[in-house]
């Protein structure tokens, strides 16, 4: 299955390997994640089923994202490659794998975690997150530029006053020291669905 994970983020210098959002899988892994890579830029990671390993998109340069302004970051798995976009523009040309046909590993699905890795305190994102969206398909480049097409939108958490899924049934709950803030804000270290 294909997937698109999209969020507005704002930070100046988040820690390396911090997670913006990840779909937890099994006892210690993730099915897919938007995160801060080892070089400080944004990347999209997908774990493939049947021992297919991981595919990591090209990394968006830190200077393109962490300047204190809001940026839309989007990770896409299209069944062949992992892609990452910043403000509607693809960074690099996607990363493929010989094991792409295995698909995303959903063997033991767990929570979608926002602002951390798997559990509060794991690898927290130090910054603001808003308007997280998960699609059950790979959005096209044109749709990502539009960023609000709404087609096949699975869940939408505005997180302005609660953890309710505005269009689906995936209502979440606050975990740890997370708190709600005004629009374009998510304060704290974790939000689980």
Image: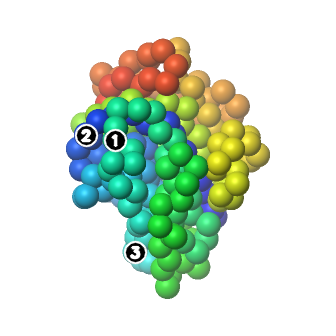
Left or right for 188, reference 161: left
Residue 45 versus residue 173 in the image, above or below: below
Pick whichever, 6 or 65, lies toward us. Answer: 65
Residue 53: mark: 3
Task: Give percent across and percent down for residue 90.
Answer: 53, 59
Q: Nearer the viewer, residue 132 or 90?
A: 90
Quadrant (top left/top right/bottom left/bottom right) for the N terminus: bottom right
Element type where label 3 sits in the image: loop
Mark 1: secondary structure: loop
Residue designated by label 1: 66
**Alpha carbon of mark 3 to alpha carbon of mark 1: how far?**
29 Å
Percent from the top left, x then y, of residue 120?
A: 30, 35
Q: Residue at x 45, y 33 (%)?
A: 70
Q: Nearer the viewer, residue 64 or 77?
A: 64
For marks 2 and 3, the one nearer the N-term is: 2
Can residue 24 be seen in the rendering of this structure?
no
Q: Is residue 158 visible?
A: yes
Q: Position of residue 147 (x, y in %)?
A: 65, 43
Residue 134, located in which quarter of the rendered image?
Answer: top right
């Amino acid at each position: 299955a294909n997937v698109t994970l999209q969020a507005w983020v704002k930070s100046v210098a988040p820690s390396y390997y911090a997670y913006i959002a990840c779909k937890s899988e099994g006892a210690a892994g993730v099915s897919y994640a938007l995160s801060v890579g080892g070089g400080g830029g944004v990347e999209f990671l997908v774990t493939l089923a049947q021992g297919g390993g991981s595919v990591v998109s090209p990394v968006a340069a830190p200077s393109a994202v962490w300047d204190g302004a809001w940026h839309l970051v989007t990770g896409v798995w299209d069944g062949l490659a992992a892609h990452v976009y910043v403000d509607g523009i693809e960074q690099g040309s996607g990363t493929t794998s010989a094991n792409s046909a295995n698909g995303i590993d959903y063997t033991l699905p767990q929570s979608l975690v926002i602002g951390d890795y798997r559990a509060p305190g794991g690898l927290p994102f130090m910054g603001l997150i808003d308007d997280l969206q998960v699609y059950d398909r790979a959005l096209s480049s044109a749709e990502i530029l539009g960023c609000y097409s709404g087609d096949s939108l699975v869940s939408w958490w505005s997180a302005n006053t609660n953890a309710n899924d505005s269009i689906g049934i995936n209502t979440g709950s606050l975990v740890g020291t997370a708190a709600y803030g005004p629009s374009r804000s998510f304060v704290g270290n974790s939000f689980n669905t």
